[in-house]
Image (cartoon, grey):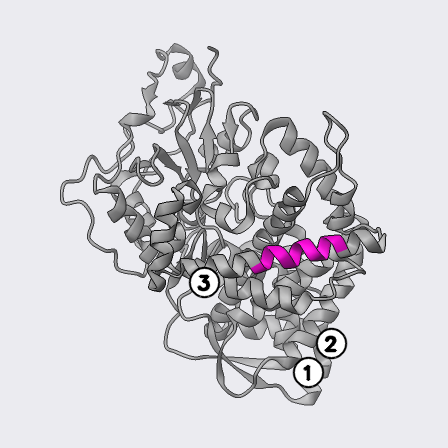
Amino acid sequence: MDVPQTTPAETTPAAGPQGPETAESMDAAVPADRCPVDHAAAGSTSAQAAAPPRAVIPATALPGPKTPSLVQVVSHFRRPAVYMQRCRELYGTRFALSRGFPPRPMYVLTQPEDVKQMFTAPNDVLHTGRSSAMIEKFIGHTGLAWLDEDEHKVRRKFLMPSMHGKALQRLEPVINEMAAQEVASWPRGQVTELHPFSYRFTLNVIREVIFGSAPPSRWDEIVDTWMEMMRFANRMAALMFYQRMSPAKVRLIKAIRPLGLHDFMKQRERSNALIAEAIEERRKSGVLGDDMLSVLLGITHEDDGSPLNGQELRDELLTVFLAGTETVAAAMAWAFLYLSHEGAARDRLVAEIDAGEDDAYLTATVQEVLRLRPSIPQIIAREVVKPIEINGVRFEPGALLWASAYLMHHDPSLYPDPYAFRPERFLDAKPGTYSWIPFGGGRIRCLGAEIAVLEMKAVLRELLAQCELRPAGAGLEEPRARVVIVIPRNGARVELRPRSREASLAGR
């Protein structure tokens, strides 16, 4: 079998930077603290030509923690940033996680050249579909997140117009108006968890993306049910693969009420019913536009010409519900926290907003927030379905490649003083395609990336025009895992104080 080849990256493996947090205890016995592959530049062109071929090593030779699978899962869930940073410090820029994390070999990549090779690999070599198993309990298993190769390409091509072009032009003024109304309703003069407010805002934006000018008549019930259902994502029990368990085992786990599965499944059933009702309501109305549901109702299967069935429609809508809300709401929450603590950056941003002439610093602020706290710190894993070599390492079918946006974004060789909040980094330089990856990359890069940036800019612009941000505590909140998303542990607690009428008007 032919194996896709890559060229060695001209980078030197080094331990990652020590972050501001204290790492938890890990293995007492630690393998070599660097990747066994020599990534250093080979010297001059003539020297490279004369050098013997580089030996290829199997991925199984990469170092990594040897603690039991469950310990790794718990450690990562409790303190995701600390755990991954510590692994990089101990094992280098590429390392392996336990076969129980999930129960297959998983290899973490943190260097731009490695990630580039992963993103640009042929679509029949690396798949992403089965890597979505962790979120199947929320979104089903027939949507875009589960499709690979031609199926993914065709579905993505259908969906793209609902998030780009004319649809994006329609959405931008709606998002701006919605941000003004939503922010005006947020509590003033008291410390408030802002993550739930940003989350509800993103849900209302997704309503516009999915339903356009004909939203469901029971939209408020859909939002309340979905938000209640997603409370389960905060629990460690959400990491379990219930869909692969026997009915008897599921009944047993549901009976243990503190785990939350019983309530989650009850809310999920209600959510599915409300979504099905909304789809049927649209069918009967005959309303068509550039919204996503209109697009989905027009898709037919290539084999028999049949339309998408109810489950396929529901799963696709729920995929967008999850991907288009959780990530953006988390990023906004981190932005609120950073700006409440970083006075100089906040003042510069307020001055730009009040002047109303440019949004360069606002854009850079959004990019810096997404660098420091990418909503999905480790992007969707790629499953190896055909052998592939990446910079001297051979990965076999069944292995998972996990690109770590968090570790890459905190690499001092890419971002000097990586833990500092400095939007200025992006004023004179655009984010790198393979060194800034909060939206993933390659053929499955987030479809709604432009909408997400519009949302963040609209809310921050309105918030700073209307309010003064004050921190609720001395330091930033630690990150907390919410299945595959990472949010502030305490929900982004910030105090909003009203700005003077004159200052608020100047910011519009």
Name the amino acid, label 2: Arg
- For the C terminus, the image quarter is bottom right
Q: Are marks 1 and 2 in contact (CB under 8 Å)?
A: yes
Left of 145 or right of it: where is 262? left
Q: Earlier in the sequence, mark 3 or mark 2?
A: 3
Q: Residue at x 66, y 56 (%)?
A: 275
Q: Residue at x 58, y 60 (%)?
A: 270
Q: Is residue 129 magenta?
A: no
- Specify few, some or many for label 1: CA neighbours under 10 Å numbering under 14, 14-19, or 20 or more: some
> Which callout, 1 or 3, points to the residue nearer the camera?
3
Q: Look at mark 3 in the image and give the residue it sits on.
A: 263
Q: Look at mark 1 in the image and give the residue it sits on.
A: 504
Q: Is residue 130 above or below residue 361?
A: above
Name the one closer to the observer, 333 or 236: 236
Q: Look at mark 2 in the image and give the residue it sits on.
A: 508
| Residue that sits furthest to the left in the current view | 28
Provide the secondary structure element on which disc 2 rests: loop
